[in-house]
Image (cartoon, rainbow, N blue to C red):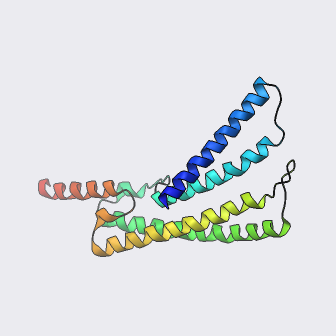
Amino acid sequence: MEQLIRVSLTTLIGLVALGQFVQVITRYILQVPVMGLEETILYPTIWLYMLGAVNASRENTQIRANVLEIFIKTARGHALLAIVGEVLSLTVITWLSWWAWDYTSYSLRVWRESPTLYIPTFYTDVALMIALVLMAVYTIWHLYRNIRALAAGNYSGLDTHEADYQAIAVDSSEEKLHG
């Protein structure tokens, strides 16, 4: 799966870069814009964004602003915070997936087309639904692993900020020794 995502993301970013390159050369150097090029670049760009979000969810590297981590001193507390974060993430993803399903079914029913090349926009609209479902699957996986690690007392096996948990555990034990 990892190889498929890497190849897909690399291919999509290559297509977007190539499309932008062709657009710059034809429009600004040759003074002959290619009609519909912006429309065709839109499709791989949207899929690139959505699959990039899925990849961040898979790697558990989303941008976070965990201010509570500063105040929580124990590895167990960080583990509980990670679980609460995953539950909240899953709740939001489920809610957004519900909306995305409505939008996807509307898009399929209406079958809109792009204005210049008449490409069905369903192929970009469905990217959101697919991405949210995959993000939900990865969030459930991370939640399961975090709960299992908490139950086993193995805080170094957590999916989020593993090095931070290990450092906190070491700092806590050093404080007890020197404290």
Placement of the C terminus among the 4 image quadrants: bottom left
The residue nearer to you, when weighing 172 against 97, is 97
Q: Is residue 135 above or below residue 52?
A: below
Q: Looking at the image, can residue 88 be seen?
A: no
Q: Is residue 161 left or right of residue 28?
A: left
- Residue at position x 64%, y 67% from top? 96
Q: Looking at the image, can residue 130 be seen?
A: yes
* Location of residue 109 in the rendering, given as x and y in whole percent from the top left corner: 83, 70
- Residue at position x 66%, y 43% from top? 16
- Residue at position x 68%, y 50% from top? 44
Q: Is residue 159 left or right of residue 53?
A: left
The residue nearer to you, when weighing 91 against 152, is 152
* Location of residue 85 in the rendering, given as x and y in whole percent from the top left corner: 46, 65
Q: Farthest top residue?
A: 29
* Location of residue 43 in the rendering, given as x and y in whole percent from the top left corner: 72, 51
Q: Is residue 131 above or below residue 49?
A: below
Q: How many marks?
A: 0
The residue nearer to you, when weighing 116 against 83, is 116
Q: Is residue 137 above or below residue 52?
A: below
Q: Farthest bottom residue?
A: 151
Residue 14 quadrant: top right
Residue 177 quadrant: bottom left
